[in-house]
Image (cartoon, rainbow, N blue to C red):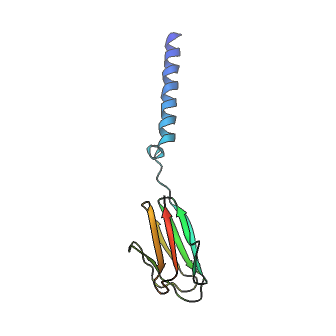
Amino acid sequence: MKKSKVYFAGLTVAIAYTVVVLTSNPAKAGSEVKSQAAEVRVDNFTFGPKSLTVPVNTTVTWVNRDDIPHVIVSDDGAFRSKALDTDDKYSFTFTKPGTYPYFCGIHPTMVGQIVVQ
């Protein structure tokens, strides 16, 4: 009877340890870092929202709802779209934390920023 109590006590500790390890570090459970998605609308010569906060590994998609072209350009050169006509989309995945100011390459008074945490 003593052997079974020791066995079950050891098994309980092993299970508890496994649960703690897997829940505190999902990468060890074989899961991958999931990417998320967010959208910025380009409409009436503005970016909406003007400032967007997202987690790391988020793909942000700009959608041009204006009837004239716009070009999405980051201040530091990290990303740049082609000219986006009405309903065209441009996406960029943010893999590092930081603040990424951007503007329209055709209309430089149009500004926005992505904050990656």
Q: Is residue 116 above or below residue 27?
A: below
Q: Give residue 98's quadrant in the image.
A: bottom left
Give the image location of residue 11, x and y in percent: 50, 24
Q: Quadrant of residue 66?
A: bottom right
Q: Residue furthest bottom?
A: 68
The residue at 59%/71% (across/down) is 49
Q: Residue furthest top?
A: 1
Of the pair 100 and 58, the residue shown nearer to us: 100
**Residue at x-position 51% and y-position 20%:** 9
Residue at the farthest left position: 77
Place of residue 54 in the rendered image (x, y in percent of width and height, measured from the top left): 53, 61
- Residue at position x 53%, y 72% from top? 61
Whether 91 is drawn above or below 23: the answer is: below
In the image, 19 versus 38, the foreground residue is: 38
Q: Position of residue 95 (x, y in %)?
A: 43, 61
Question: Which residue is rendered at x = 52% and y = 69% of the image?
Answer: 60
Q: Say whether residue 65 is left or right of residue 77.
A: right
Q: How many marks?
A: 0
Q: Quadrant of residue 79?
A: bottom left
